Image (spheres, rainbow, N blue to C red):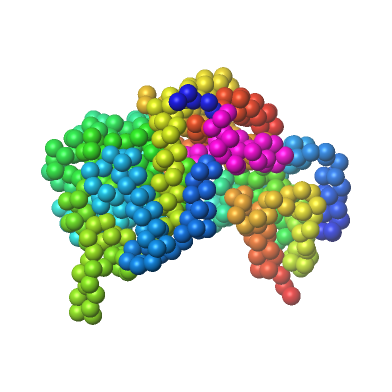
Amino acid sequence: MAFDVNKIREDFPILKRKVNGCPLVYLDNAATSQKPRKVIDSIVDYYENYNSNIHRGVHSISQEATDAYEEARKKIQKHFNVKESKEIILTSGTTHSINLVANGFTSLLNKEDEILISELEHHSNIVPWQMMCEKNGAKIKVIPLTSNGELNYDSFLGLLSNKTKLVFVNHVSNALGTINPIKSIISKAHEYGAAVLIDGAQASSHIKADLQDLNVDFYTTSAHKLCGPTGIGMLFGKKEWLTKMPPYQGGGEMISEVTFEKTTYADLPHKFEAGTPNIAGAIGFGASLDYLNSIGFENIEAYESELLNYATNKLKNIPELKIYGEAKDKTSVISFNVGELHSYDIGTILDKFGIAVRTGQHCAQPVMDYFGISGTVRASFSFYNTKQEIDYFCKSLERAITMLS
Amino acid sequence: MDIIEVQNEIVEEFSLFEDWMQRYEYMIELGKSIDLIDSSKKIDTNLIKGCQSKLWLHAELREDKLIFKADSEAIITKGIAAILLRVFSNQTPKNILEANLEFIDKIGLKEHLSPTRANGLLSMIKQIKYYALAFNKN
């Protein structure tokens, strides 16, 4: 299919709106993506036509809802090339997934064990492990950054040992857009018998990960980053690990038999899906994968990298503008500052021009500390953005700089 | 000038502007001439919470009036602080406590008043009122 951005933009109702009297230019895609009509319709269709609680309902619409929910799981399985659909746990998103794994590992690790976390991590990928380590005494070791925003691979190799039980790295850094060499990280970690969890939240909208090929132990993402609804995401876990891990939350759906003496847990994946799940969200998630695959990830990757190069070159012409994170492999994210100007000021003025960017620390304080800055402006591009929008963004940025200087 | 007179003066100044850009440019100018907090007072206990850029505010009583000083890393936040200082600094605690804030709406800065805005305007106003409460003798 030929890639026609103007045709694609027609799929996104929100792109027609104005903000502060100007057409919306949405460059905050790393925070959340916009939703195409097909995803919105799938959610409306569920609520209008077959809203019902799933699993174990004998009536027809409960069966329809169950089928749609399980169909969504199969779509996720297929998209990420996962061997068995029961290895896909539907969660409320990446943060939930990481907490689920951290909880599962609490009883599997002890004070002799170490876990490796990269300095590039989002706060949600640091805090759950600190909480876990408080309980089981395991130690956190940090894989440092290099000055261009890449992971220091040699340091990673130096930190690996027989004590290493878990390695946590994001596939793509949310603050800088760096794509980490996860395939070699996974195979190196496996040489020492360590499990690997990859946070794919920032990657999934740009890269279609083949989880069997990666041979990863855990992989997680949030649907809202890839044109799906908020409040739903997935955790892939290898069957061996998911079987070994105790349940995270107790409640309905996750039990097999309950008496006051003892409860036996349901089989995978339901063991980790306590309570009535986000049914509409799962259906929307499935619809978003259908939508993205109909455009094609090779088209998305090629177009977004064109946008990234175009924007990077234009921004580099602005005096005193410094880009943070210039890894060889990066997604369409540009984190920058201009001279002594504060990111908050730039973001505020850009908003007045109808441009949405993110400012501040991007939930990645360690990354900001590494560069010795209090924050950045982050513009992140998606396949529905255009070069005209980038032109307007750069022009507006220059006006903001003039105003603020 | 009492608080209402200062507020009216500010409203009149802002009424001359035709668009947001002129308003913001003026605010930025005001920020540059703010009554700067002494660097020794730029400590964590004087930080205003809820602001994406660091914002410090301090007050002291001179005779019967409160003198406010502030600074911020962000120039727009500093401009907003400068407007508040112009209204509330050099006033008695009692008058500060009684003052209303309708002028903020009138000068087109109402959008900054939402508690979810990350500029700390609301927290700044709260802190000014707390100072007034603490120094109020009645």
Please give left or right for residue B56 compared with residue A234 in the image: right
Q: Quadrant of the C terminus of chain A?
A: top right
Q: Residue at x 50, y 58 (%)?
A: A49
Q: Quadrant of the N terminus of chain A?
A: top left
The image quadrant of residue B23 is: top right
Please say whether residue A306 is visible from this viewpoint.
yes
- Give residue A75's position: percent from left, percent from top: 35, 44
User: Residue extending furthest front?
Assistant: A60
Of the pair B6 and A295, the residue shown nearer to us:
A295
- Give residue B92's position: percent from left, percent from top: 77, 64
Magenta span contains residue A82: no
User: Residue extending furthest bottom?
Assistant: A260
Q: Residue at x 40, y 35 (%)?
A: A293
Of the pair A189 and A46, the residue shown nearer to us:
A46
- Give residue A325's position: percent from left, percent from top: 42, 30
Span colored in magenta: A6-33
Q: Residue at x 37, y 49 (%)?
A: A72
Q: Is residue A272 above or below residue B40?
A: below
